[in-house]
Amino acid sequence: MAEEDVENTTAHLSVAERLASEALIVDVDGFEGPLDLLLTLSRTQKVDLRKISVLDLARQYLSFVDKAKALRIELAADYLVMAAWLAFLKSRLLLPPDPTEEGPSGEELAAHLAFQLERLQAMRDAAARLMARDRLGRDIFVRGLPETVERVRKVHYTATLLDLMQGYARIRTRDEFRPFVMDRDHVFTMEQALERMRGLIGFAGTWTDISSYMPDGWSDDPIRRRSATAATFAASLELAKEGKVEIRQSESFAPVQVRRRDPRE
Amino acid sequence: MNKEAEAPEEVEKSLFEAPPIAEQERMVEAILFATSEPVTVRELEARMPHGCDPAEALAHLRKRYEGRGVRVVRVGDAWAVRTAPDLAFLMQKETVETRKLSRAAIETLAIISYHQPVTRAEIEEIRGVSVSRGTVDQLLEMEWIRFGRRKMTPGRPVTFVVTQDFLDHFGLESARDLPGLKELRSAGLLENRPPPSMMPQTGEGDVDAEEETAEGQSELFED
Amino acid sequence: MNKEAEAPEEVEKSLFEAPPIAEQERMVEAILFATSEPVTVRELEARMPHGCDPAEALAHLRKRYEGRGVRVVRVGDAWAVRTAPDLAFLMQKETVETRKLSRAAIETLAIISYHQPVTRAEIEEIRGVSVSRGTVDQLLEMEWIRFGRRKMTPGRPVTFVVTQDFLDHFGLESARDLPGLKELRSAGLLENRPPPSMMPQTGEGDVDAEEETAEGQSELFED
């Protein structure tokens, strides 16, 4: 039935229309899809798009597709999908509505197609108006000699009072939370004793009691005295080992004496 | 305002008295003249001394330049000085060749501007043909369109909107000032009418591409 | 210009009536604005319609821009629009970036505020690590600290004290009011050291500094 219609339509086409549709075929590449083609075809109806005859349009489209096929023009899939759909739409529009059938009526489908065409045409008109506006660089111009704007980057630092206090507390509590910590106020280290003795030993040409090398202020407090004594004794041994001093003790618990060792000896 | 109620930063501001409005107008004039890009009120505010009211200064300035060889024009939420269009004939020397846009690109641009925010699928539905990547890329590259918010529909597709550059190029204060927008809207031509079922869906083959775009987007913007 | 004085070849020009001077002024305005380099009178003449008098239009325009935010200035034998010199400061675009002060800077600042006047060596001793020059410079630059009196110790090292800006920023009347100094102490966070011993070791500098804070304070606020 569709076939017949196409033939009929073709037969009824005027020469001008035929030329037009042949031109369409030649220009098939120029169409931006089936909707564009339908819009172009609809112009031959020369009516308000709202009053367009979708049925006529469907016929024209189908005949266009048939001709394209006859001329062995490869049509993109969406043209063929549209053709199939329009054939379906045409049958719906021609046949009385089947009350058992679900879905939109032929009229609804046709109305939507008309809406789509009208909308596309409206967008084309809008595009034309847009492009015809006064345009920057063509009708309107920007400052030709812009002045350089110097960019200055300024970093703004912030800190809160809490940051400050926490920072301080962090520092001041660091020692307390150290896993191993000695109260160094009461400890005289061997390093300290060594340093002290190295400075003094040069003058000790004769045997001297090592207690005289004790640092000032460490003799009164027994805890401090013990630390200082031990450190000084250890330092003496270290110096003896280095060959800097000689060390002697006359008997157990007698005072320990040191003397500078002359390098020439 | 009483002193006790003042926030500390306002105290600082009040230390500097804002310049008289005539002076502020001069400042806005200097800033707008110095650049070829539109400048936002916010930016003006940031560059002018504390307490200035650039919006008011702008209103004065705009009035001052009415009918002159250059005009103060609004571009979205920014402002710029531009030559009066009727003097275009003097400017052949300054004319810049804009890249010739394809018909597809022009239509796509129009659809985006009138329907924004709009998804690629919606553009395809309106044009009845799939939108080639190149078309969108070209418009993006010209910075006439950009990505808008994702649509809250299945697949959360990306949308396109027009940019300030677009408004600037076409001399539009905002997208609301697009020619014929009202008429198109009242004619229902900007509605996104879903097609009745059984209508052939255009650009269906492109669905995959669109999904890829969506992913690309999230990669681009979410990290 | 009077008609009688016109040379014969200018008769042709007079066929086109020259636009009114106000219109010519608009033209000059637009050309000067849009051209990418200063424009000579000769060039203006070439671009404007026949019979125009760009020199006069320029004079008008120049007057119009007197005292405005931009001015018409002579550049060699050409003319251009330029920002008024007194507004040059607007051509600096300041971008302010807010950043959190580094831990090292906060600690150094805390030590200075609690122990002022304090030398770098003392800060280092309290922090237990050396203080980079950058950190101190940063605080000086922010004007949160400044140099105090030199310490009367060998080498007469410079000391640091906090500034009024610092007090303002932290909402303090004086560094003595540093909330938490007492609280920290009673909470055991700020250990009370035993009286200075003979030991030339840790702690001594601290206590001294703390004692001197009182002095430093008076120096800071009584002069």
Image (tube, coloured by chain):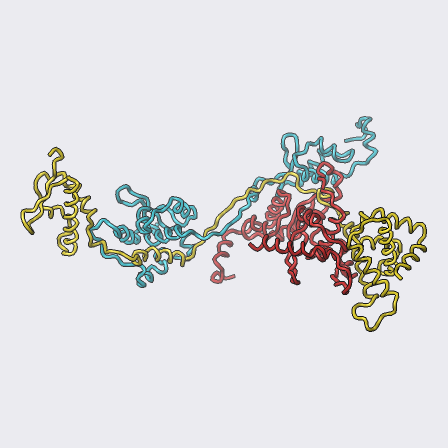
Chain colours: A yellow, B red, C cyan
Q: Quadrant of residue B81?
A: top right
Q: Percent from the top left, x then y, of residue C40? A: 68, 32
Look at 83% across and 60% down and name the residue there: A86
The N terminus of chain A lies in quadrant: bottom right
Decide if residue A230 is on the left or right side of residue B203: left
Residue at coordinates 39% horizontally, 49% vertically from top-left? C145
Name which quarter of the figure residue C90 lies in: top right
Report x, y in % for residue B107: 75, 51
Residue extending furthest toward the left: A250
* Viewer-side residue, B223 vs A82: A82
| The residue positioned farthest toward the bottom in the image shown | A100
- The structure residue drawn at horizontal position 9% and vertical position 47%, both measured from the top left corner, is A256
Q: Position of residue A228 (x, y in %)?
A: 16, 51
| Residue A40 at x, y percent in the picture | 84, 52
User: Looking at the figure, which quarter contains the C terminus of chain A?
Assistant: top left
Q: In the image, is residue C178 above or below residue A147? A: below
Q: Nearer the viewer, residue A9 or C206?
A: A9
Residue A57 seen in the current view: yes
Q: Is residue B63 visible?
A: no
- Residue A259 falls in which quadrant of the image? top left
Between residue B143 and residue C180, name the one nearer to us.
Answer: B143
